[in-house]
């Protein structure tokens, strides 16, 4: 029973002190400093907490009761001379009275009395920082460096310099830390990412790059600086410089090309295909015995394929040369599980660009018999086969292959893709109600792209069926859409023109313009495509296609028409007017690049000669 009573008493005392602490803080916030001082002093006398004492001294300073503050601090220093933070408080009391010499005397006494104790040094530096005495905080860390040979306080100094906005010194300390211990690279990257990319001061990035280049030139054997610089360049989408330094590290350290493979993949993801191609060529040049030769060969062709198909700018000879490269590589490496992606890309190239549909289908059907192919790769090949059969107007065979993937992988992204293609096939042939039912399910897909496409197609069906029960206009539009997929652009255009002529006021008007713009884009008629995209954006700005049209207009204006200023304005319009668009992320990145946020390729002479 006595133990229980003691427990209750302790609990009551603790509760009372919490209430007193809250009361003191309330007084302080209400600027009732005399009342707050009384409560904080009582709390300090009970608990000897530095937190309460600091508030007590602050109250006295607010009351301008400097005499009491001085007496109290002298008394506390006498009782606990090892608590160097008290000297900071004492010096600050003098400083607010403009007794600067006396203040400096106390601050210097604190630093003089430092001994090799990391916690004491940290506490003293924090006390100086709290009073904005940054020079003395730096002196504290510097003395700590002398006293503690195994700890350099680089991170703490970097934080201090950041507070002071002394970015060059901050960066130097981070680099000093890495020079001492490369294991801090992730920590430094995290700090830099937080500091540089959330700051409004653009000079920090330039200072960082300049500092790293100087370190590399001074100490070329310390590769961590090159690695950090490469990371910075990649963050900034400056893959040209990233490639230069990555090759340099690989050569200097006589590595196997792994860094180049990783860089190339990142460049591919960011659609910097030229950089990826150069990186893969470097790895391939190491020879067939190189560990990453096969990966480089595979992904090299993939980069060329992506470059050609994404840009839309190519000649028949370029496509034929690429087909030849695929065939030669498959002869060299063999048709096996590790080259299945090459087989799939070659089939797509043959079917959709070279009109060799039968050869493409045969190639893919044989690939399904290759042993050891991953189930996901099998599904990808079956979806590709469905596309080729649909290209060949064999709706039944296309349905079978899409259906197999949907059945085998119902909850995967590939399963969702197959379900979407199956629903779109139904839409192509005019089975709108069934297609709409499937699309409604896909709206909840974890793939944002599939969900967005499903939402758009479902809205076309539902909106137009409600207005046109005869379905004639929608059937014509779906027919034109299928003809476009089958690369029968002239027939698609004739069908769309007929639709516009026969249904002049139909709600499909913007969809017709959008499909025409897409066809013009595929056929490299970028001026005509841009006119139609701009018309959709200006005349149908509140419709579902407005942000899509604006995004494609910006891309064409930037990459094909080469009007960077106009493209920048289009990206900015998208960011401001359509903040929920799936194109916001890429538009923001492209806008920042055009605005000049990404620094140009450096002109410094490097320490190596490539």
Image (cartoon, rainbow, N blue to C red):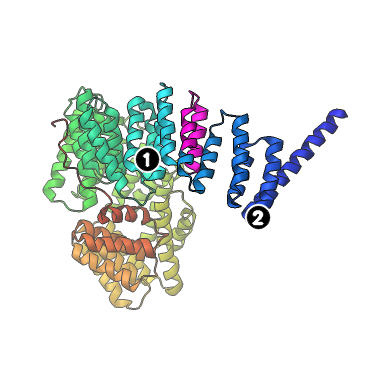
- Mark 1 is surrounded, within 10 Å at the Cα level, by few (under 14), some (14 to 19) or many (20 or more) other residues, namely some
Numbered circles on residues, count: 2
Q: Compared to 541, does 345 lie above or below?
A: above
Bounds of the magenta segment: 105-132
- Of the 4 image quadrants, the one containing the C terminus is top left
Q: Compared to 506, does 74 lie above or below?
A: above
Q: Residue 8: x, y in percent?
A: 82, 36
Give whichever of 301, 28 is nearer the camera: 28
Circles 2 and 1, Cβ within 8 Å, touching? The answer is no
Q: Earlier in the sequence, mark 2 or mark 1?
A: 2
Asked where in the image residue 224 lies, by quadrant, the reply is top left
Question: Can I make out residue 346 in this image?
Answer: no
At mark 2, the secondary structure is loop
Residue projecting furthest to the right:
1
Q: Compared to 538, does 60 lie above or below?
A: above
Residue carrying label 1? 192
Give whichever of 400, 409 is nearer the camera: 409
Residue carrying label 2? 32
Residue plotted at (34% across, 55% down)? 588
Left or right of 451 on screen, residue 264? left
């Amino acid at each position: 029973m006595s133990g229980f009573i003691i427990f209750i008493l302790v609990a009551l005392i603790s509760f009372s002190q919490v209430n007193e602490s809250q009361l003191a803080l309330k007084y302080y916030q209400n600027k009732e400093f005399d009342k707050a001082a009384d409560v904080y002093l009582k709390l300090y006398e009970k608990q000897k907490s530095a937190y309460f004492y600091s508030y007590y001294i602050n109250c006295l300073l607010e009351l301008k009761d400097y005499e009491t503050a001085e007496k109290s601090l002298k008394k506390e220093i006498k009782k606990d001379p090892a608590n160097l933070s008290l000297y900071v408080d004492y010096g600050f009391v003098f400083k607010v009275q403009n007794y600067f010499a006396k203040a400096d005397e106390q601050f210097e006494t604190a630093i003089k009395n430092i001994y090799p104790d990391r916690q004491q040094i940290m506490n003293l530096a924090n006390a100086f920082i709290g009073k904005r005495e940054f020079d003395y905080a730096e002196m504290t860390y510097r003395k700590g460096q002398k006293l503690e040979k195994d700890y350099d306080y680089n991170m703490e100094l970097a934080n201090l310099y950041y507070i002071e906005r002394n970015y060059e010194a901050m960066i130097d300390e981070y680099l000093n830390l890495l020079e001492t211990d490369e294991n801090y690279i992730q920590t430094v990257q995290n700090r830099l990412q937080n500091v540089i990319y959330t700051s409004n001061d653009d000079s920090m990035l330039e200072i960082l790059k300049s500092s790293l280049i100087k370190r590399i030139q001074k100490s070329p054997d310390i590769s961590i600086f090159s690695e950090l610089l490469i990371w910075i360049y990649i963050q900034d989408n400056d893959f040209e410089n990233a490639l230069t330094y990555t090759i340099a590290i690989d050569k200097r350290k006589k590595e196997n090309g792994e860094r180049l493979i990783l860089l190339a993949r990142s460049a591919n993801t960011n659609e910097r295909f030229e950089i990826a191609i150069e990186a893969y060529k470097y790895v391939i040049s190491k020879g067939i015995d190189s560990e990453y030769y096969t990966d480089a060969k595979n992904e090299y062709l993939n980069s060329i394929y992506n470059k050609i198909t994404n840009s839309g700018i190519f000649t028949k000879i370029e496509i034929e040369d690429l087909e030849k490269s695929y065939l030669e590589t498959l002869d060299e490496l063999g048709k096996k599980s590790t080259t299945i992606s090459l087989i799939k890309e070659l089939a797509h190239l043959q079917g959709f660009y070279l009109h060799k549909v039968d050869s493409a289908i045969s190639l893919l059907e044989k690939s399904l018999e290759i042993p050891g192919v991953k189930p996901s790769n099998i599904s990808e090949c079956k979806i590709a086969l469905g596309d080729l059969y649909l290209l060949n107007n064999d709706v039944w065979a296309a349905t079978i292959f899409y259906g197999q993937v949907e059945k085998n992988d119902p909850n995967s992204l590939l399963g969702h893709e197959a379900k979407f293609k199956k629903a779109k096939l139904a839409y192509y042939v005019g089975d709108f109600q069934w297609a709409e039912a499937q699309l409604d399910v896909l709206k909840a897909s974890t793939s944002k792209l599939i969900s967005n496409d499903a939402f758009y197609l479902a809205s076309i069906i539902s909106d137009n069926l409600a207005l046109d029960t005869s379905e004639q206009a929608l059937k014509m539009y779906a027919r034109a859409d299928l003809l476009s997929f089958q690369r029968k652009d002239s027939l698609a255009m004739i069908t769309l023109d007929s639709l516009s002529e026969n249904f002049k006021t139909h709600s499909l008007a913007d969809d017709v313009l959008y499909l025409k713009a897409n066809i013009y884009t595929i056929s490299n008629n970028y001026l005509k495509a841009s006119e139609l995209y701009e018309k959709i954006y200006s005349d149908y700005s509140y419709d579902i296609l407005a942000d899509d049209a604006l995004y494609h207009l910006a891309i064409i204006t930037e990459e094909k028409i080469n009007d960077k200023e106009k493209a920048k304005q289009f990206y900015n319009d998208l960011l401001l007017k359509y903040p929920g668009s799936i194109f916001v992320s890429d538009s923001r990145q492209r806008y920042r690049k055009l605005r000049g946020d990404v620094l140009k390729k450096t002109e410094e002479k490097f320490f190596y000669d490539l």
